[in-house]
Image: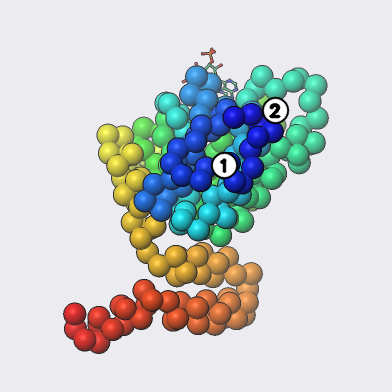
């Protein structure tokens, strides 16, 4: 299917769909968005970034999808920006037009967003992973702050998320160094939600995502919204709406009934 033929009706309604550079699979309430350029360690090119932004829109709009997982095909999550980009490209315009729609779609995603990280995660690939709510990480993963090594600032929303997730002095010191760190160090930095052994990584990731997809979708989304409230008062205001909504769901009523009748 060419780009021009992609629209919400023809796109990922059921099962697995292969676009040029990503693969989308939907199973047990989980929408899997997989970077699919394994021969280039899932380096992020323009096609991939645009296809992923479109896929995110569809996955968010699809009410059968309760949890979205980002993963990479092959031996890496992503090696960052595809460095075969034209050397005279205006990176500012490129970020604005190509990266930012995807970065916004990830960061504003109302549904739980999980990054499943293995192999290598570098540069802008790291930035995309940091936009997720949780990161399930295989123990042998290497985290590379590659940007400075090629004379660039960290981008694709990376600095914002790093500052949110870890101590700002450690974050900027790491970005200035260009160091590659292992998954244990990344965990100490606060970038890892669950560190799992390589041989159980896919299973652990699938179980985590599918268990989350079984929870009350209203409570799960509400929880995410409340964790993003802009202030204490805004949070109190928003919890009124969310808890009212949760209180009216069947899942809540059935759970209350079961408790009260000791079933
Ligand atoms: C790649 C890449 C890659 C293309 C591996 N591109 N082919 C930058 C610019 C503009 C605007 C927006 O923002 C940014 C932000 C950034 O993301 S900057 C950071 C960019 N990423 C990097 O600097 C990492 C570059 N890659 C590497 O350092 C290594 O490939 C790592 C350490 C990730 C993995 O090393 P190895 O395990 O030894 O694998 P490899 O280097 O042999 O890579 C396998 C293939 O993938 C190889 O292709 P080939 O045809 O020779 O088999 C690489 O050329 C290709 N590849 N990363 N980013």
What residue sits right under mark 1 in the picture? 11
Q: Residue 104 location, x and y as percent? A: 66, 50
Q: Residue 174 location, x and y as percent? A: 56, 39
The mark nearer the N terminus, 1 or 2, is 1
**Left or right side of 55 for 24:** left
| Label 2 crowd (10 A; few <14 / some 14-19 / many >=20) | few
Front residue (pair 43, 47):
47
Instruction: Using the numbered discs, state the Cα–Cα distance from disc 1 to disc 2 in whole angstroms.
Output: 39 Å
**Left or right side of 108 for 111:** left
Residue 172 visible, this orientation: no
Above or below 156: residue 237 = below
Determine whether label 1 and label 2 are within 8 Å by CB: no
Q: Look at the numbered disc 2 and give the secondary structure of its residue.
A: loop
Residue that sits furthest to the front in the current view: 9
Task: Tell me which corner region of the image, top left, top right, bottom left or bottom right, holds residue 66.
Answer: bottom left
| Residue under the point 47% across and 33% down | 72
Q: Look at the numbered disc 1 and give the secondary structure of its residue.
A: loop
**Left or right side of 83 for 39:** left
| Label 1 crowd (10 A; few <14 / some 14-19 / many >=20) | some
Where, quadrant-wise, is the C terminus in this rendering? bottom left
Above or below 96: residue 260 = below
Q: Residue 68 location, x and y as percent? A: 48, 50
Q: Nearer the viewer, mark 1 or mark 2?
A: 1
Task: Tell me which corner region of the image, top left, top right, bottom left or bottom right, holds residue 44.
Answer: top right
What residue sits right under mark 2 in the picture? 151
Image mark for residue 117: none
Residue that sits furthest to the left in the current view: 263
Q: Residue 191 location, x and y as percent? A: 47, 47
| Residue under the point 42% across and 50% down | 30
The colouring scheme, among rainbow, by chain, secondary structure or one colour, is rainbow
Classify the position of ligand 1 by quadrant: top left, top right, bottom left or bottom right.
top right
């Amino acid at each position: 299917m060419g780009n021009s033929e992609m629209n919400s009706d023809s796109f990922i309604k059921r099962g697995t769909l292969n676009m040029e550079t990503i693969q989308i699979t939907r199973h047990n309430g989980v929408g899997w968005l997989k970077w699919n350029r394994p021969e280039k360690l899932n380096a992020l090119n323009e096609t991939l970034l645009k296809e992923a932004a479109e896929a995110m829109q569809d996955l968010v709009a699809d009410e059968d999808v309760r949890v979205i997982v980002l993963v990479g095909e092959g031996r890496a999550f992503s090696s960052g920006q595809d460095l075969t980009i034209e050397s005279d490209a205006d990176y500012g315009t490129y970020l604005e037009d190509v990266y930012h729609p995807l970065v916004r779609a990830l960061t504003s995603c109302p549904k739980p967003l999980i990054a499943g990280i293995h192999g290598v995660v570098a540069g802008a690939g790291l930035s995309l992973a940091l936009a997720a709510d949780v990161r399930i990480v295989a123990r042998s993963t290497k985290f590379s702050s590659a940007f400075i090594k090629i004379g660039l600032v960290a981008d694709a929303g990376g600095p914002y998320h790093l500052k949110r997730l870890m101590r700002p002095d450690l974050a900027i010191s790491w970005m200035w160094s260009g160091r590659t760190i292992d998954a244990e160090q990344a965990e100490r930095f606060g970038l890892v939600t669950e560190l799992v052994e390589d041989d159980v990584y896919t299973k652990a990731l699938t179980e985590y995502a599918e268990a989350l997809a079984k929870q009350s979708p209203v409570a799960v989304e509400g929880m995410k919204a409340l964790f993003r409230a802009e202030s204490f008062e805004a949070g109190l205001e928003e919890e009124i709406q969310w808890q009212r909504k949760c209180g009216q769901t069947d899942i809540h009523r059935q759970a209350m009934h079961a408790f009260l009748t000791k079933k």
